[in-house]
Amino acid sequence: MTINTKEDWIAEARYVVPLLPEYMASVSGQADPSMIEAELNKHLAAEDWKMLYRRFNEIWSWLPDRPDIHRHPFGRLCNLCSEYWVFEEERCA
């Protein structure tokens, strides 16, 4: 999905959040999927996009650099991290 608007970013975030926990747990062997999902869902429910963006960046940085990081769903996570400008553009308009 191409992110061009704040609404695109939010829709993508809502799509990606349920996909992250299990994959993160399988990669690390340590992460608790239910805790990760609860944390991310808390920010979704509060519509706290800035904090969700921060968490997405933390997840991206935490994950090991390996080829599948750019595949689904993590290619989408990369987009969420790099396309947060849609919120900044709105403030400047």
Image (tube, grey):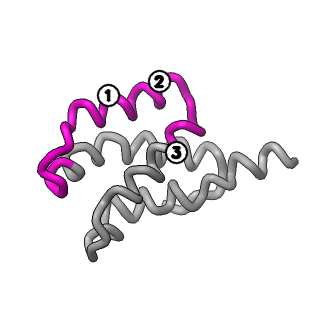
Question: Horizontally, is 41 left or right of 11 in the view?
Answer: left
- Spatial CA span between label 2 and label 3: 16 Å
Whichever of callouts 2 and 3 sits on the residue coming sooner in the sequence is 2
Residue located 52% across and 56% down the image: 81
Q: Which residue is mark 3?
A: 54
The image's mark for residue 45 is 2
Question: Horizontally, is 68 left or right of 55 in the view?
Answer: left
Whichever of callouts 1 and 3 sits on the residue coming sooner in the sequence is 1
Q: Which residue is mark 1?
A: 38
Mark nearer the viewer, 2 or 3: 3
- Spatial CA span between label 1 and label 3: 15 Å
Mark nearer the viewer, 1 or 3: 3
Per the image, label 2 sits on a secondary structure element best described as helix
- Spatial CA span between label 1 and label 2: 10 Å
- Residue 16 drawn at (x, y percent): 37, 47
Asked if residue 86 is among those painted magenta in the image, a careful observer would answer no
Which secondary structure type mostly characterizes the magenta part of the structure?
helix
The crowd level at tag 3 (other Cα within 10 Å; few <14, some 14-19, many 20+) is few
Mark nearer the viewer, 1 or 2: 1
Q: Which residues are magenta?
A: 25-52
Q: Look at the numbered discs 1 and 2 and tell me whether their residues touch, using CB distance below 8 Å.
A: no
